[in-house]
Amino acid sequence: MTGIITKTEALIQVLRDRLARRALGPGDRLPSIRRFAETMNVSPSTVVEAYDRLAAEGVIRARRGAGFYVADANMPPMKVAQMGASRDRDIDPFWVSRQALSAAPGSLQPGCGWLPEAWMPQNALRKGLRALAKADGTVLTNYAGVQVPDTLLRVLQTRFAEESLPVAPDQIMLTGCASQALDLICRLFLNPGDTVLVDDPGYFNFHALLRAHRVQIAGVPHGPAGPDLDAFAAALQQGPRLYITNSALHNPTGATISPQVAYRVLSLAAKQDLIIVEDDTFADLEPEPSPRLAVLDGLNRVLRIGGFSKTLSASLRCGHVAGRSDWIEALIDLQVATSFGGPSPVAAELLAGVLTGGSYRKHLADLHRRLSLARKRVTAHLAPLGIAPILQPRGGFYLWCRFPDGIDTAEIARHCLGDGIILAPGNVFSPTESASRFMRFNVAQMDSPRIYAALQAAMA
Amino acid sequence: MTGIITKTEALIQVLRDRLARRALGPGDRLPSIRRFAETMNVSPSTVVEAYDRLAAEGVIRARRGAGFYVADANMPPMKVAQMGASRDRDIDPFWVSRQALSAAPGSLQPGCGWLPEAWMPQNALRKGLRALAKADGTVLTNYAGVQVPDTLLRVLQTRFAEESLPVAPDQIMLTGCASQALDLICRLFLNPGDTVLVDDPGYFNFHALLRAHRVQIAGVPHGPAGPDLDAFAAALQQGPRLYITNSALHNPTGATISPQVAYRVLSLAAKQDLIIVEDDTFADLEPEPSPRLAVLDGLNRVLRIGGFSKTLSASLRCGHVAGRSDWIEALIDLQVATSFGGPSPVAAELLAGVLTGGSYRKHLADLHRRLSLARKRVTAHLAPLGIAPILQPRGGFYLWCRFPDGIDTAEIARHCLGDGIILAPGNVFSPTESASRFMRFNVAQMDSPRIYAALQAAMA
């Protein structure tokens, strides 16, 4: 029995699918009528009809003059079937994480967010482990205390002091990683339905995390000098609680905020009492220092997240957050409630050992040199395919590249996955799905000629 | 300017304080009028007046025939000042965690939930660290994949198989600890305002965690053979989503569920489609096996949490959850979103190394013997003070003890804290605050005569 499905019905089905797999969550804004009509190649009146019918069902609701939103009420909790069903089909914010974290041996991963193991300071880690075998029994067997262990605290304070940012011991805490830090911050400050500003494009896992908090994500276009100030000012009118950003070596574009934009962002945020989360995970990949919101602000309304997953080891699971002492105190309480304390003392001790061992700065210098060459080499290899980075970053391993007209990078990614190559197509970074012509490449994972051949084949 | 405060105003202030520091959260039921009147030593009409005035303000609301509840709407997010203000004053579910995790060197900790470092297998850990120094670079530097690493998977599967519980690889995942496992489960299944059943008394940090999820906590009286079945059946009428329990070596009582109670709990849960979370953190402290809900149920509606923090190392931060494969898949997605993958591969490898190293079973046998002696010794030392365990547990390090008439153990705990002794008073374990005459003692932390002297002085 094959019935005739009208365009409206087809559109409703598309929306139901997005809701079912939480590509649209409670409180999320639906695409504007005009944009959705263009995207789906239907008339605006078809979109209006589809929206009206879903609104009549209570699935979405209209806000006067402000578009349509997914209804908060009656949403079931994020369910198994809904989250799992899309695993093999959809290019959503989970796509890259899933593929990269469960990659088969031998896969190539130009889409992943880490360096190859051979680029990491393995000898320093092995030396650190041998030293750890002689550590105090407390470190080896006890729960983490709520204070940062002394050695690691001194290392972190010294690093902050080099940026002229004084940080007291009660202004800093350890977390398992940047995502966990952000998760605690969301728990502290957000209610379901709140609005959070993110960069567009921006790190996809932030979107997945915010969805788990059932908040509304608003994208601020991100350019070579940081967020677009007009768009940022306009977005503030929505009354967001948080703005999450990378100031330096922005993921995925590699951009670095300019001093003028940094100053203006802070001024605008102050007027609206907006809290800013500055994720500085990529800090050590920067060859020279650049402006930081947290430094200008003096940890007043900026919470700064950091860690060593990208340059030392992602296996240790030990990051940190610095911020106002009363906020840090509340975040520690939440961490005790949800994970009974901070990350592994074994990991913290090993991290401190490597950071104070004397070889880390040289390792970074080598890394900067090596990555600079890799960025140039990959740019040269991509050029004949008509693929070009929108800017040459000051450091790091990402290149955010534009593809030729008419190419949808999600299709390219799907095609290349068949060849065992995991890519990071643009739209997984874009809450407005406006980056289908872009792709993020990790230059440290692109030595194999197979990658360029597969890209060429997929584009053909 | 000192005005005269009426009893009603004083009562309102008490309630406002509890709301401010989240001792009462959105959706929580307020104490019954009769009980609150007794507790506060005022007339029931005073309580009625206080409740009515708060209800008029919209702070709480009445449900016909079902008492008063904290209003859901307009609650600010859990805030700094509210969570932090009570730090030094109140004996709330956070009290023991805070005190124990930030204990000054030299403090005595009969209230803590772990063994002294000297009781832990330090040599095996040191040997494991030296072996780890030669491990594959992937283990040392990469993010955790979404699958459980092979060696650890085999160890866990073998342990489950010894209990006749077959567990497929897609039915198990690693987490940072038991609390983090429970946290992910709550994210998957709960909406704010849902009801969750816990044991009364039960592990205090579960209450803190559930509060962070803004759900309503309903206590089920827990006795020597497990939960009270009549109370459990009655509580099911509230339509709870989850029941969280320890079947063996229950924290804090040390009780073990009987086969009959286990069967009945599962049968009742099946009728109401209730999901059960069985926290089995204390499993390895049991000298002989006892019934498990997860085993009877075959991981159908029971999720089983486990780990090695109590017997091997709490510093590694590596626990696990076993359950239905579709649930595990969804939990892994949530873990990727909120912590970008599982716990440290370094920790998982070290754990697997110690567990397969050959000395762990002997270590457990030694521990069982040592704890059995300690339980007897501490029982004998407490007897002259009129303090007696309500039951002699089959294993583990907890004794749940009743104090003589008229003693409030919160007062004892507050007093002893001044002597540098951290205790775990009964009411931190009781969602109904009905355990003020009880205290949980950790027998492995009670060698010092100072503890008994301080208890005696505090009781005098």
Image (cartoon, coloured by chain):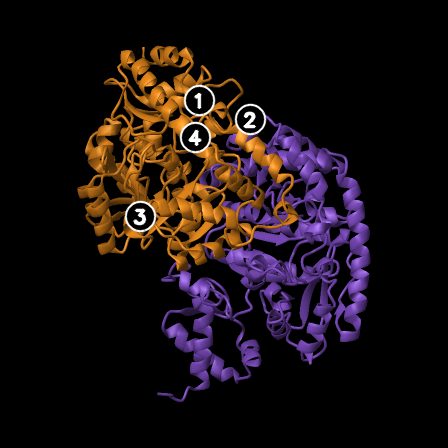
Chain colours: A orange, B purple
> Residue placed at 43% from the left, 77% from the top?
B13
Q: CA distance from mark 4 to mark 2?
A: 20 Å
Chain letter of the residue carrying label 4: A
| Residue labelled with disc 2 | B137
Name the element at disc 4.
helix
Q: Is residue A206 left or right of residue A255?
A: right
| Residue labelled with disc 1 | A109
> Residue placed at 77% from the left, 45% from the top?
B364
Whether residue B39 is visible: yes
Q: Amino acid at mark 4?
A: Lys
Name the element at disc 2.
helix
**Same chain check for tags 1 and 4:** yes
Q: Are marks 3 and 2 in contact (CB under 8 Å)?
A: no
The mark that comes first in sequence, 1 or 4, is: 1
Q: CA distance from mark 1 to mark 2?
A: 17 Å
Foreground pick, B331 / A338: A338
| Residue labelled with disc 3 | A295
Q: Position of residue B126 (x, y in %)?
A: 67, 39
Chain letter of the residue carrying label 1: A
| Residue labelled with disc 4 | A362
Q: CA distance from mark 1 to mark 4?
A: 27 Å
**Same chain check for tags 1 and 2:** no
* For discs 3 and 4, the disc positioned in front in the rendered view: 4
Q: Residue furthest front?
A: A358
Q: CA distance from mark 3 to mark 4?
A: 25 Å
Residue B89 numbered mark, or none: none
Chain letter of the residue carrying label 2: B
Q: Is residue B36 left or right of residue B123?
A: left
* For discs 1 and 2, the disc positioned in front in the rendered view: 2
> Considering only vertical position in the picture, is A9 above or below A58?
above
